[in-house]
Every structure is written in C-alpha cells, then in structure tokens.
Amino acid sequence: MRRYGKNPDEDDIRVRPNRKGNRPRTHIRPKHEDAEDGMVLTVDRGRLTCLVDGRTVVAMKARELGRKAAVVGDTVSLVGDLSGEKDTLARIVRIASRRTVLRRTADDDDPYERVVVANADQLAIVTALADPEPRPRMIDRCLVAAYDGGLTPLLVLTKSDLASPDKLLEAYTPLGVPYVVTSREELESGGAADRVREQLEGKITAFVGHSGVGKTTLVNALVPKDRRRTTGIVNAVTGRGRHTTTSALALPLPDGRGWVVDTPGVRSFGLHHVDPSRVIHAFPDLEPGTEECPRGCTHDENQPECALDAWVAEGHADSARLDSLRRLLATRERREGD
C-alpha cells in the first residue's frame, strides 16, 4: 500500500471524480447572523418558495427547527444560496413570531390544529349566493376563527346575478362585518374586482371559501398576471364544488398595493382550537358588560347570571349585537352542517 509523505507531488494524488456532477461539499456553513429575511409565498412537499429582496428563492427548513413548520405568510430568515437561480436551494433557519394566525381543525372533535396562513391582516370569506347555496354556519365559523386569530373579517358575496344578497346581509349587518357583493358580469367587466381591491389596499388578505363559490375566479380577476386554474363545476346532487386550488399561495396585488393569499377550498371548518372566552374581544361594545359576569361565565342565553342581558337592557349596546355574539359562541358547539 502506497503511503504519501508530508509533501507529496501533485501527480501522486488521485482525485475521485464526482459522478453526480454536483458541487463538492464543504465544511464551511453559512452563519445564521448573516441570514436574510423573506416571506413564505407557498409550501409544496417540504419545499418553500420565499420572496427575498424581490427574488423568488426555493428553500427547505433547517433540521435545527425540529417540528416547527413555516406556513404561507411567515417571515423567515434564510441562509445559503439566495440567488433564486434554477436548481438552487436555500435553508430556513428562523421563523419570526406571528402577528396573527388563521387556524382550523378538520372537525370540532379533531385536536390536530392546522395553520392556514400567518400574519394576514384580513380574512375574506367568499360565499356564493347560489350554485352552491350559501351556508351561514360556515360563515359563522370563519368569523369565529378570524376573531380568534386577530384577523379582520370581510364578507365577499359572489353570483348576485343568481340570487339576492338581502336575506344573508340582514343576518350579518348587526356584526358590523364589511361586505362586497359581486356578479359574474361585473367580474368579467372588472368593476367588481375594483370594489374588492379597494378593501384589500395595503393589507395581506387570506381568501377562504367552499369549493365552487368562485374564490379562485375572483383571485384571478384581482391578480390577472398570475392566473390559477378554475372550474365553476358544482355537483348537482351534493351542491358542492370540486377543488381546483391544492395549496395556499400568496400573490401580490398590482402596483404592490397588498397581498392576496388564495387557499384551497374547504368542506368544513373545525373550531376545536378556539377558546370561546376570546370571541368576546370582537365585540368591544359588549366586552365592558362582562365585568359583572360570574367567573367562568359562558355568556350563553341559558345562563341566568350573565350580566350582558342587563348591560343591553340599560342601553349600553344593541340587543342584535348580543344575539350575534351568542350565535357565534353557539357555533363552537354546533357542527357546521347542523
């Protein structure tokens, strides 16, 4: 066996060829303090597409983060190759604290919590007025999730050419939820998109809705240069649409005036993770009245010692607001299809 001395001649050293043709590995690792911040745009099978200083960078999560997952909307710190060139891969080493979090569970009995989007300012609840029929229980559940996660809700009603929005709006006017009504014709002409875009100005808005309600069609009208596949097909038997969006994706509005996060269509919105005591924070006109409630009061209408009834009777708040609060609190205990 040949042994090399301390100063072997270069011709005596054999270099093993790199059969894979990739870059040679190095023991030099990027320093975490040199990491650059970015925003997660989408997640696909362990690969995260991030926006870093105007460049789209593909990254993976560093092993030291353990089971902590990054989701769309997260602010992350990245090291490695941040050029954004093809076949490059960066590494996410930190996930910043979240300002807001939209969560859901598969069902009220499911303890597994799914984070839909992080750091969104607003939740646009997209509901068709017909084909498929509106489902108020679903709207109520989305409202509870928005209030619990720190997001401002926005009600977007589509297909007004097929049915009137008056009855549905009557139920949500007492909640003070802003709304926009659209039709297919207005979406094609661009007028509806302009009205919705006004509500999104300077905000990160997550769009949530059942399949077939026209959510992705609306997103395509808002961000025409990044069109996503749509379908409009609704099952005639079940009245439900078919999923076309399979992963959440953050898209910039024209001229950088905000962000739209298109999420996959949902069939249910579980609220296992929601603490009902936090829903009252969305009713600042009622919250002071809870100071006289007994400890552990659920503010339910069947709880005789709840102080909110007296608070409303004294004229501090509208009775319709108390009815709305109790309807949302009851949503936590009801299944969406009930």
Image (spheres, rainbow, N blue to C red):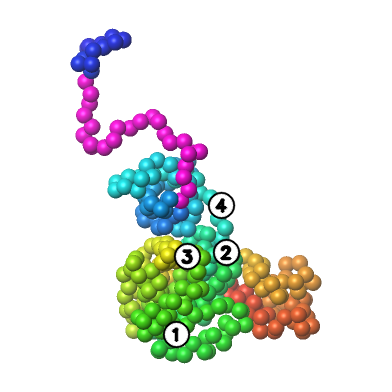
Classify the position of the N terminus by image quarter: top left
Residue under the point 44% across and 55% down: 40
Q: Are marks 3 and 1 in contact (CB under 8 Å)?
A: no
Instruction: Say which residue label 4 marks.
Output: 97
Query: How far is mark 3 from mark 1, CA to CA?
Result: 27 Å
In magenta segment, residue 187 = no
- For the stretch drawn in magenta, what is the main secondary structure? loop
**Whether residue 73 is situated above or below residue 269 in the rendered picture:** above
Per the rendered image, the range of residues in magenta is 14-38
Q: Quadrant of residue 185?
A: bottom left
Question: Mark 3, mark 1: which one is toward the viewer?
Answer: 3
Q: Secondary structure at mark 1?
A: loop
Q: Residue beneath label 1, please?
A: 129
Q: Secondary structure at mark 4?
A: loop
Foreground tag (3 vs 2): 3
Q: As shown in the figure, which amino acid type bears the numbered disc 2?
A: Gly
Q: Which comes sooner in the sequence, label 4 or label 2?
A: 4
Spatial separation of the CA atoms under disc 4 and disc 2: 14 Å
* Above or below: residue 51 compared with residue 289: above
**Where in the figure is residue 148, as x and y percent of width and height?**
59, 66
Residue carrying label 3 = 258
Mark 3 or mark 1, earlier in chain = 1
Q: Do residues under tags 1 and 4 come within 8 Å of each other at their CB atoms?
A: no
Inter-mark Cα distance, 1 to 2: 26 Å
Q: Which residue is mark 2?
A: 149
Going from N to C along the chain, the mark reached first, 3 or 4, is 4
| Distance CA(mark 3)–CA(mark 4) | 21 Å
Please name the amino acid that badge 3 sits on: Gly
Tag 3, which secondary structure? loop
Q: How far is disc 1 from disc 4 in space, using C-alphas?
A: 38 Å
Count how many numbered circles sit on residues in the image.
4
